[in-house]
């Protein structure tokens, strides 16, 4: 294909719209341009090709033989392009929206609000992958990940959704005379740990607790760790927003907390997002 020899696409579109509709006005309406713009584009196309595409001798211009031949080719070509564009743009919309997050965030924040999203967008199917393991973005991967951190991840777009600190908490009945005085001391105490790599395991690593579990460890689904802490079964690390009421009413006691800017972020791959993801992210932002 020698592209420099090709006429402008706008001129070909204008001529196809005219040939299909049989009227300059209808062609102008179809392309949302003015009546004179269609006529000018067709004349520009004739000049580029050095061929008369319309016979303007009568009251109503008629396609010449050359015009009819070009119109037939354009009709098929634009129809094929339109069909392929529709296939590309609707393929992903038929796929459910896959949201990756941790069990704690899913149980404490996302799932209680999902009914509102379903009410607003009943035609968008959503799959919540409450798995602490990180997944790669891609056609078979998540559309968006809701993850805890500082948002400084490379190669992705991250937007803060909920700002919160991580805290180490325990029930008052668990507090004793030799309770931990530094985060590193937590290794010597019974810990309640969420399954897999999670907010709490990353917190322990960040605070130098490399040998967690010497004092015993119970591994639970994320939504059960706080309940176990309330029952005095050990120390757990969790987002402060999940235990604010417990701290206020004295059911849990704060032992340590993070310093710095942390929170849950909407994480997506850089680039263009499909329509359902845009709506979901807009909805998420409206929840905060």
Image: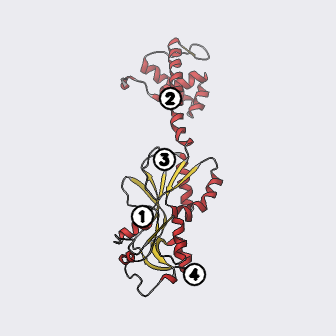
Classify residue 213 as left or right of residue 19: left
In the displayed structure, 104 sits above or below 281; it is below
Q: CA distance from mark 1 to mark 3?
A: 23 Å
Name the disc covering residue 249, or none.
4
Q: CA distance from mark 3 to mark 2?
A: 22 Å
* Closer to the camera in the image, 117 or 174: 174
SS class of the residue under badge 2?
A: helix
Q: Earlier in the sequence, mark 3 or mark 2?
A: 2
* Closer to the camera in the image, 265 or 222: 222
How far across and how far down the image is residue 133, in percent? 44, 57
Of labels 2 and 1, the one closer to you: 1
Question: In the rendered structure, are the residues bearing label 1 and label 3 in contact, judged by CB atoms less than 8 Å apart?
Answer: no
Q: Earlier in the sequence, mark 1 or mark 3?
A: 1
SS class of the residue under badge 1?
A: strand
- What residue would you read off at disc 2? 81
Q: CA distance from mark 1 to mark 4?
A: 27 Å
Residue 212: image quadrant is bottom left
Of labels 2 and 4, the one closer to you: 4
Pick the quarter of the image with the N terminus: top left
């Amino acid at each position: 294909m020698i592209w420099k020899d090709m006429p402008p696409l706008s001129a070909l579109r204008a001529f196809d719209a005219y040939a299909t509709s049989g009227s300059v006005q209808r062609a102008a309406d179809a392309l949302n341009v003015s009546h004179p713009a269609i006529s000018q584009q067709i004349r520009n196309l004739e000049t580029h090709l050095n061929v008369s595409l319309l016979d303007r001798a009568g009251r109503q211009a008629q396609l010449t033989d050359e015009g009819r031949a070009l119109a037939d080719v354009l009709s098929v070509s634009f129809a094929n392009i339109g069909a392929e564009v529709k296939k590309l743009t609707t393929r992903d919309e038929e796929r459910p929206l896959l949201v990756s997050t941790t069990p704690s965030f899913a149980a404490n924040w996302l799932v209680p609000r999902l009914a509102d999203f379903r009410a607003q967008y009943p035609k968008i199917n959503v799959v919540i992958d409450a798995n602490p393991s990180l997944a790669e973005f891609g056609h078979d991967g998540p559309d968006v990940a809701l993850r805890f951190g500082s948002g400084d991840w490379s190669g992705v777009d991250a937007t803060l959704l909920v700002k919160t600190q991580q805290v180490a908490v325990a029930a008052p009945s668990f507090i004793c005379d030799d309770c931990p005085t530094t985060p590193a001391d937590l290794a010597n105490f019974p810990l309640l740990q969420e399954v897999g790599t999670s907010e709490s395991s990353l917190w322990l690593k960040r605070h130098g607790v490399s040998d967690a579990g010497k004092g015993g460890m119970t591994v639970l689904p994320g939504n059960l760790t706080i309940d176990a802490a309330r029952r005095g079964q050990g120390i757990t690390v969790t987002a402060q927003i999940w235990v604010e009421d417990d701290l206020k009413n004295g059911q849990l006691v704060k032992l340590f907390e993070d310093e710095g800017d942390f929170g849950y972020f909407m994480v997506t791959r850089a680039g263009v997002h499909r329509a359902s993801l845009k709506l979901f992210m807009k909805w998420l932002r409206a929840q905060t």
